[in-house]
Image (cartoon, rainbow, N blue to C red):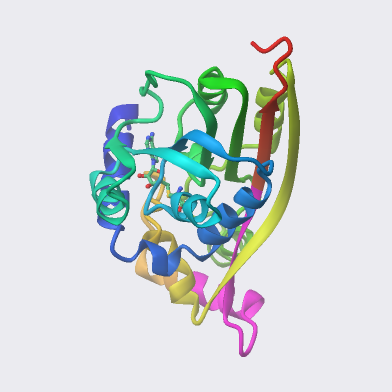
Amino acid sequence: MPEERIKAHVRGRFSAAVADYEHWAVVQRQAARHLLTLLPERSFERVLDIGCGTGFLVEGLLEAGGARNITGIDFAPRMVEHCRRQWPEQLFFCADAEAFEPCSLYDLILSSFTFQWLERIPAAVGKYYSFLEEKGVFALALPVSGSLRELQSAALVANGKPLHLLEFPDPEVLDTAFRSFRGCHFRHEIQELTAWFETPLEGIRSLKGIGASYGGGEVYKVGEMRRLLQEYEKTFGVPGRGCPVSYRVWFGVAEKTGTGDR
Ligand SMILES: C[S@@+](CC[C@H](N)C(=O)[O-])C[C@H]1O[C@@H](n2cnc3c(N)ncnc32)[C@H](O)[C@@H]1O
């Protein structure tokens, strides 16, 4: 599928998911909260949130009280409308993160669970880093390869083929992109974050609920889906807890030190 059509499809899925997003986005909320704990303790005058969704990062930043002027961008119109209603005093607009060119610099640029959707991740990382003020901070969280391991393993055992989901980036790609910045202090870590769903079907539905689209491959037939659900519950289900959906999440924070910045 051409890039523009994939983007239009993904944008439509996220826009449609807005009403239920927060119900399903258990790991996404945890990741946003954790990313905020990794920020240096200081206040930020101008903040940019890329792929703001329903605003987990915005909410956390405002609660913590260290951020003043927040701009959020998202390419899904209904996500943007939601944030505008929620925080009318902040600025939200509809834009494709890969085409967006900020017209000013920021002292905090952050993004959670969005960069995995971008076509050219290293180019986007480099672009946004270049829009940091001196001593600015760039903080990113996103799922990487190894995410959704329970569902993919059950799919392989049940049907001999994986589910057609978004391909998550290799963490090396992120490490390399961040290490290329000079004059900055860079820290990163990987955590496995798990959400538990009552039934195997709910585990699968959580992917749709957060707007995650099947990656344009062949559609699973009813019988294949039934086998997958049985295998998923048999191998990974835990009585009293349900079925796990795990994401391997890469967190990175680059703080400009003001010497030799690119
Ligand atoms: C999984 S949600 C994460 C939302 C939010 N950051 C959070 O932590 O819950 C991903 C968001 O990125 C947006 N998105 C994906 N690709 C985008 C792009 N190319 N430009 C702008 N927004 C994009 C989607 O519309 C969606 O709202």
Most foreground residue, 242 or 230: 242
Quadrant of image for the C terminus:
top right
Q: Can residue 233 be found in the magenta stretch?
A: yes
Residue 74, position as x, y percentages in the image: 34, 40
- Residue shown at 40%/58% (left/top)? 210
Q: Quadrant of ligand 1?
A: top left
Report the number of numbered marks: 0
Q: Mark yes or no: residue 205 visible.
A: no
Residue found 51% across the figure and 55% down from its top = 60
Task: Please name the residue shown 42% across and 19% down the image.
Answer: 104
Q: Is residue 90 something one can see in this rendering? A: yes
Q: Which residue extends farthest bottom? A: 240
180 above or below 170?
Answer: above
- As drawn, is 102 to the left or to the right of 257? left
Q: Picture quarter containing residue 98?
A: top left
* Of residues 112 and 200, the one drawn nearer to the viewer in this rendering: 112
**Image quadrant of residue 237?**
bottom right
Q: Position of residue 255 (x, y in %)?
A: 68, 29
Question: As rendered, which of 152 and 180 lies closer to the eye?
Answer: 180
Query: From which residue to which does the magenta span run?
Result: 227-249
Q: Quadrant of the N terminus?
A: top left
40 sits to left or right of 139: right
Q: Is residue 192 magenta?
A: no
Residue 17: where, in percent of width, then height? 31, 58
224 left or right, relative to 232? left
Q: Position of residue 32 (x, y in %)?
A: 55, 53
